[in-house]
Image (tube, rainbow, N blue to C red):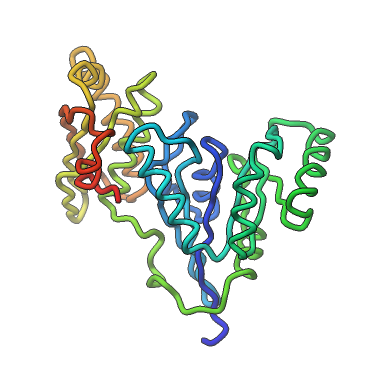
Amino acid sequence: MTDFRAGFVNIIGFPNVGKSTLLNKLVGENLAITSPKVQTTRQRILGIITTKHYQLIISDTPGILNPTYELQKVMQEEIAEAFEDADIFIYMVEAGDKPPKHLEWIGKIKNAGVPYFLVINKIDLTDEVTLKQKMKEWAEVTGEENILPLSALYINDMSAFVDKLAEKLPVHEAYFPEEYISDKTERFIAAEKIREQAFYIYKQEIPYSIEVEIRSFKEEDNIIRISAEIYVSRESQKHIVIGKNGQALKELGTAARLQMEEFFKKKVFLEIHVKVLEDWQHKRNILRKLGYK
Protein backbone atom coordinates (compact mmCIF):
# COMPACT_ATOMS: atom_id res chain seq x y z
CA MET A 1 0.00 0.00 0.00
CA THR A 2 2.68 2.46 -1.08
CA ASP A 3 0.13 5.13 -2.00
CA PHE A 4 -1.66 5.04 1.37
CA ARG A 5 -1.85 8.47 2.97
CA ALA A 6 -2.03 9.37 6.66
CA GLY A 7 -1.47 12.44 8.77
CA PHE A 8 -2.63 14.95 11.36
CA VAL A 9 -5.15 17.67 10.54
CA ASN A 10 -5.05 20.17 13.39
CA ILE A 11 -7.86 22.65 14.00
CA ILE A 12 -6.76 25.99 15.50
CA GLY A 13 -8.79 29.04 16.45
CA PHE A 14 -10.03 31.37 19.15
CA PRO A 15 -12.62 30.16 21.69
CA ASN A 16 -16.15 29.34 20.56
CA VAL A 17 -15.58 29.55 16.79
CA GLY A 18 -16.89 26.00 16.31
CA LYS A 19 -13.75 23.83 16.33
CA SER A 20 -15.31 20.99 18.31
CA THR A 21 -18.47 21.03 16.22
CA LEU A 22 -16.38 20.81 13.05
CA LEU A 23 -14.42 17.84 14.41
CA ASN A 24 -17.64 16.03 15.28
CA LYS A 25 -19.13 16.67 11.85
CA LEU A 26 -15.99 15.55 10.02
CA VAL A 27 -15.71 12.33 12.00
CA GLY A 28 -19.45 11.67 12.20
CA GLU A 29 -19.36 11.11 15.98
CA ASN A 30 -19.95 13.41 18.95
CA LEU A 31 -16.44 12.94 20.29
CA ALA A 32 -15.66 16.49 21.39
CA ILE A 33 -18.01 18.20 23.82
CA THR A 34 -19.65 21.46 22.76
CA SER A 35 -21.51 24.28 24.47
CA PRO A 36 -22.41 27.91 23.80
CA LYS A 37 -19.82 28.97 26.41
CA VAL A 38 -16.17 29.71 25.67
CA GLN A 39 -13.29 27.49 26.83
CA THR A 40 -15.34 24.30 26.81
CA THR A 41 -12.45 22.30 25.30
CA ARG A 42 -9.56 21.76 27.73
CA GLN A 43 -7.57 18.94 26.16
CA ARG A 44 -6.61 18.03 22.64
CA ILE A 45 -8.76 15.22 21.27
CA LEU A 46 -8.18 13.25 18.07
CA GLY A 47 -10.94 12.03 15.78
CA ILE A 48 -9.86 9.37 13.28
CA ILE A 49 -11.24 8.58 9.83
CA THR A 50 -9.79 5.48 8.15
CA THR A 51 -10.55 4.19 4.66
CA LYS A 52 -8.74 1.85 2.28
CA HIS A 53 -6.77 4.80 0.92
CA TYR A 54 -6.10 7.15 3.82
CA GLN A 55 -6.24 7.86 7.54
CA LEU A 56 -7.19 11.37 8.64
CA ILE A 57 -6.34 12.17 12.26
CA ILE A 58 -8.26 15.34 13.05
CA SER A 59 -7.25 17.23 16.17
CA ASP A 60 -9.51 19.56 18.14
CA THR A 61 -7.62 22.00 20.36
CA PRO A 62 -8.50 24.47 23.14
CA GLY A 63 -9.21 28.03 22.07
CA ILE A 64 -6.41 30.57 21.79
CA LEU A 65 -6.17 32.84 24.84
CA ASN A 66 -3.71 34.62 27.12
CA PRO A 67 -3.43 32.24 30.10
CA THR A 68 -3.80 33.60 33.63
CA TYR A 69 -3.63 30.38 35.68
CA GLU A 70 -2.17 26.87 35.42
CA LEU A 71 -5.08 25.12 33.70
CA GLN A 72 -5.15 27.76 30.97
CA LYS A 73 -1.37 27.40 30.58
CA VAL A 74 -1.80 23.66 30.06
CA MET A 75 -4.52 24.34 27.50
CA GLN A 76 -2.20 26.62 25.52
CA GLU A 77 0.52 23.97 25.62
CA GLU A 78 -1.93 21.69 23.81
CA ILE A 79 -2.00 24.22 20.96
CA ALA A 80 1.79 24.34 20.87
CA GLU A 81 1.83 20.55 20.55
CA ALA A 82 -0.50 20.80 17.57
CA PHE A 83 2.13 22.88 15.77
CA GLU A 84 4.69 20.12 16.23
CA ASP A 85 2.86 17.31 14.43
CA ALA A 86 0.56 19.04 11.92
CA ASP A 87 0.49 17.80 8.34
CA ILE A 88 -2.45 20.09 7.56
CA PHE A 89 -3.93 23.03 9.47
CA ILE A 90 -7.52 24.19 9.63
CA TYR A 91 -7.70 27.72 10.99
CA MET A 92 -11.25 28.66 11.99
CA VAL A 93 -12.82 32.10 12.20
CA GLU A 94 -16.39 33.34 12.49
CA ALA A 95 -18.18 35.04 9.61
CA GLY A 96 -18.12 38.37 11.42
CA ASP A 97 -14.40 38.29 12.27
CA LYS A 98 -11.92 40.77 10.80
CA PRO A 99 -8.48 39.58 9.60
CA PRO A 100 -6.21 41.81 11.76
CA LYS A 101 -7.06 39.89 14.94
CA HIS A 102 -5.86 36.66 13.34
CA LEU A 103 -2.76 37.71 11.40
CA GLU A 104 -0.29 36.54 14.04
CA TRP A 105 -1.67 33.00 14.13
CA ILE A 106 -2.16 32.75 10.38
CA GLY A 107 1.47 33.84 10.06
CA LYS A 108 2.53 31.01 12.39
CA ILE A 109 0.57 28.53 10.29
CA LYS A 110 2.11 29.78 7.05
CA ASN A 111 5.58 29.51 8.59
CA ALA A 112 4.90 25.88 9.49
CA GLY A 113 5.21 25.09 5.79
CA VAL A 114 2.29 22.66 5.53
CA PRO A 115 -1.03 22.95 3.65
CA TYR A 116 -3.79 24.84 5.41
CA PHE A 117 -7.43 25.85 5.04
CA LEU A 118 -9.18 28.90 6.42
CA VAL A 119 -12.68 27.87 7.48
CA ILE A 120 -15.13 30.76 7.84
CA ASN A 121 -17.76 29.35 10.16
CA LYS A 122 -21.27 30.44 11.16
CA ILE A 123 -22.14 31.83 7.73
CA ASP A 124 -25.80 31.27 8.64
CA LEU A 125 -25.47 34.39 10.83
CA THR A 126 -24.62 36.71 7.94
CA ASP A 127 -26.01 37.64 4.51
CA GLU A 128 -24.60 36.82 1.09
CA VAL A 129 -23.35 40.33 0.31
CA THR A 130 -21.49 40.63 3.61
CA LEU A 131 -20.02 37.16 3.23
CA LYS A 132 -18.65 37.94 -0.24
CA GLN A 133 -16.98 41.07 1.12
CA LYS A 134 -15.48 39.12 4.02
CA MET A 135 -14.16 36.45 1.67
CA LYS A 136 -12.43 39.16 -0.38
CA GLU A 137 -10.76 40.48 2.75
CA TRP A 138 -9.62 37.01 3.78
CA ALA A 139 -8.45 36.15 0.26
CA GLU A 140 -5.90 38.97 0.52
CA VAL A 141 -4.44 37.18 3.56
CA THR A 142 -4.64 33.51 2.63
CA GLY A 143 -5.48 33.27 -1.05
CA GLU A 144 -8.94 32.38 -2.30
CA GLU A 145 -8.09 28.71 -2.89
CA ASN A 146 -7.56 28.15 0.86
CA ILE A 147 -10.94 29.49 2.01
CA LEU A 148 -13.95 27.37 2.88
CA PRO A 149 -17.15 29.09 4.12
CA LEU A 150 -19.59 26.87 5.98
CA SER A 151 -21.90 26.49 8.96
CA ALA A 152 -20.53 23.56 10.95
CA LEU A 153 -23.62 23.38 13.11
CA TYR A 154 -25.97 22.78 10.20
CA ILE A 155 -23.93 21.09 7.47
CA ASN A 156 -24.44 17.32 7.33
CA ASP A 157 -22.38 16.16 4.37
CA MET A 158 -18.67 16.84 4.91
CA SER A 159 -17.46 14.31 2.34
CA ALA A 160 -16.20 16.92 -0.15
CA PHE A 161 -14.09 18.62 2.52
CA VAL A 162 -12.82 15.27 3.82
CA ASP A 163 -11.72 14.42 0.26
CA LYS A 164 -9.88 17.76 0.00
CA LEU A 165 -8.07 17.07 3.25
CA ALA A 166 -7.17 13.52 2.20
CA GLU A 167 -5.62 14.80 -1.04
CA LYS A 168 -3.20 16.95 0.98
CA LEU A 169 -2.02 14.14 3.27
CA PRO A 170 1.52 12.81 2.92
CA VAL A 171 2.16 9.23 1.88
CA HIS A 172 2.48 7.37 5.17
CA GLU A 173 1.32 4.19 6.84
CA ALA A 174 -1.63 4.38 9.26
CA TYR A 175 -0.89 5.67 12.75
CA PHE A 176 -3.84 3.90 14.40
CA PRO A 177 -5.66 0.58 13.87
CA GLU A 178 -8.53 0.98 11.42
CA GLU A 179 -11.24 0.38 14.05
CA TYR A 180 -10.14 3.40 16.14
CA ILE A 181 -12.31 6.53 15.99
CA SER A 182 -10.33 8.44 18.64
CA ASP A 183 -7.20 8.34 20.74
CA LYS A 184 -9.23 8.89 23.91
CA THR A 185 -10.48 6.14 26.22
CA GLU A 186 -14.12 5.43 27.03
CA ARG A 187 -13.44 6.74 30.54
CA PHE A 188 -12.30 10.08 29.11
CA ILE A 189 -15.37 10.35 26.89
CA ALA A 190 -17.70 9.50 29.79
CA ALA A 191 -16.07 12.19 31.94
CA GLU A 192 -16.42 14.73 29.15
CA LYS A 193 -20.12 13.94 28.72
CA ILE A 194 -20.65 14.88 32.36
CA ARG A 195 -18.61 18.05 32.03
CA GLU A 196 -20.48 19.01 28.85
CA GLN A 197 -23.84 18.90 30.58
CA ALA A 198 -22.48 21.05 33.42
CA PHE A 199 -22.07 23.89 30.92
CA TYR A 200 -25.79 23.73 30.18
CA ILE A 201 -27.08 23.24 33.73
CA TYR A 202 -24.90 25.56 35.83
CA LYS A 203 -24.26 29.28 35.46
CA GLN A 204 -21.39 31.72 35.79
CA GLU A 205 -18.10 30.25 37.02
CA ILE A 206 -19.39 26.82 38.09
CA PRO A 207 -18.72 24.90 34.81
CA TYR A 208 -15.17 26.28 34.77
CA SER A 209 -14.59 25.13 38.35
CA ILE A 210 -15.62 21.53 37.62
CA GLU A 211 -13.35 18.62 36.78
CA VAL A 212 -14.60 15.05 36.37
CA GLU A 213 -12.78 11.81 37.13
CA ILE A 214 -14.19 8.38 36.32
CA ARG A 215 -13.44 6.15 39.29
CA SER A 216 -15.00 2.99 37.87
CA PHE A 217 -16.08 1.92 34.38
CA LYS A 218 -17.45 -1.62 34.20
CA GLU A 219 -19.01 -2.86 30.97
CA GLU A 220 -21.38 -5.81 31.19
CA ASP A 221 -23.43 -7.51 28.47
CA ASN A 222 -26.39 -5.14 28.65
CA ILE A 223 -25.21 -2.20 30.72
CA ILE A 224 -22.21 -0.02 31.56
CA ARG A 225 -21.82 0.86 35.24
CA ILE A 226 -19.96 4.11 35.81
CA SER A 227 -18.93 5.81 39.04
CA ALA A 228 -17.73 9.40 38.69
CA GLU A 229 -16.40 12.09 40.97
CA ILE A 230 -16.88 15.78 40.29
CA TYR A 231 -14.23 18.03 41.78
CA VAL A 232 -14.92 21.69 42.54
CA SER A 233 -12.62 24.37 43.89
CA ARG A 234 -14.60 25.52 46.91
CA GLU A 235 -17.17 24.23 49.40
CA SER A 236 -19.73 26.82 48.24
CA GLN A 237 -19.50 25.42 44.71
CA LYS A 238 -20.18 21.91 45.99
CA HIS A 239 -23.52 23.03 47.39
CA ILE A 240 -24.46 24.66 44.07
CA VAL A 241 -23.52 21.56 42.05
CA ILE A 242 -25.60 19.32 44.32
CA GLY A 243 -28.50 21.77 44.52
CA LYS A 244 -31.50 21.86 46.84
CA ASN A 245 -32.40 18.32 47.85
CA GLY A 246 -29.87 17.08 45.28
CA GLN A 247 -32.00 18.23 42.34
CA ALA A 248 -29.22 19.92 40.33
CA LEU A 249 -26.95 16.89 40.59
CA LYS A 250 -29.84 14.62 39.63
CA GLU A 251 -30.54 16.75 36.55
CA LEU A 252 -26.86 16.65 35.60
CA GLY A 253 -26.66 12.88 36.07
CA THR A 254 -29.75 12.22 33.96
CA ALA A 255 -28.61 14.46 31.10
CA ALA A 256 -25.09 12.97 31.11
CA ARG A 257 -26.40 9.40 31.27
CA LEU A 258 -28.62 9.95 28.23
CA GLN A 259 -25.66 11.37 26.28
CA MET A 260 -23.53 8.37 27.27
CA GLU A 261 -26.21 5.91 26.23
CA GLU A 262 -26.47 7.57 22.84
CA PHE A 263 -22.70 7.45 22.35
CA PHE A 264 -21.98 3.97 23.75
CA LYS A 265 -25.18 2.46 22.27
CA LYS A 266 -25.87 0.71 25.57
CA LYS A 267 -27.73 1.30 28.84
CA VAL A 268 -25.71 3.19 31.44
CA PHE A 269 -25.95 3.20 35.23
CA LEU A 270 -24.28 6.39 36.46
CA GLU A 271 -23.51 7.46 40.01
CA ILE A 272 -21.86 10.80 40.74
CA HIS A 273 -20.21 12.10 43.92
CA VAL A 274 -19.05 15.68 44.47
CA LYS A 275 -15.83 16.55 46.31
CA VAL A 276 -13.84 19.70 46.99
CA LEU A 277 -10.32 19.79 45.54
CA GLU A 278 -9.26 23.24 46.56
CA ASP A 279 -8.01 25.48 43.75
CA TRP A 280 -7.27 22.47 41.54
CA GLN A 281 -7.04 24.66 38.40
CA HIS A 282 -4.04 26.51 39.85
CA LYS A 283 -1.89 23.52 40.85
CA ARG A 284 0.21 21.79 38.19
CA ASN A 285 0.78 18.65 40.27
CA ILE A 286 -2.96 18.12 40.72
CA LEU A 287 -3.59 18.76 37.03
CA ARG A 288 -1.11 15.99 36.17
CA LYS A 289 -2.91 13.58 38.50
CA LEU A 290 -6.16 14.48 36.74
CA GLY A 291 -4.69 13.50 33.37
CA TYR A 292 -3.46 16.83 32.04
CA LYS A 293 0.02 16.93 30.54
Residue 230 location (% of width, % of height) = 21, 33
Residue 245 x/y as whole percent: 18, 14
Could you tell me residue 120's position as x and y percent?
A: 68, 43
Is 258 in front, or is 63? Answer: 63
Residue 180: image x %, image y %? 38, 65
Could you tell me which residue is drawn at 61 percent across and 65 percent down?
114
Q: Residue at x 27, y 35 (%)?
A: 211
- Indicate the quadrant where residue 243 lies: top left
Q: Is residue 29 above or below residue 64?
A: below
Residue 249: image quadrant is top left
Q: Kindly tell me whether residue 285 is visible in this rendering.
A: yes
- Which residue shows up at 45% across the image and 57% down it? 47
Taking 249 as reference, is 88 above or below it?
below
Q: Vertical placement of 165 versus 173: above or below?
A: above
Give the farthest residue toward the top. 244
Q: Nearer the viewer, residue 54 or 43?
A: 43
Q: Residue furthest bottom?
A: 2
Depth check: give the residue in front, 247 or 285.
285
In the picture, measured across the screen, residue 132 lies left or right of residue 72, that is right
Res. 274 visible in picture: no
Count of all numbered marks drawn on residues in the image: 0
Q: Could you tell whether 149 is left or right of 76 in the image? A: right
At x 66%, y 64%, the residue is 164
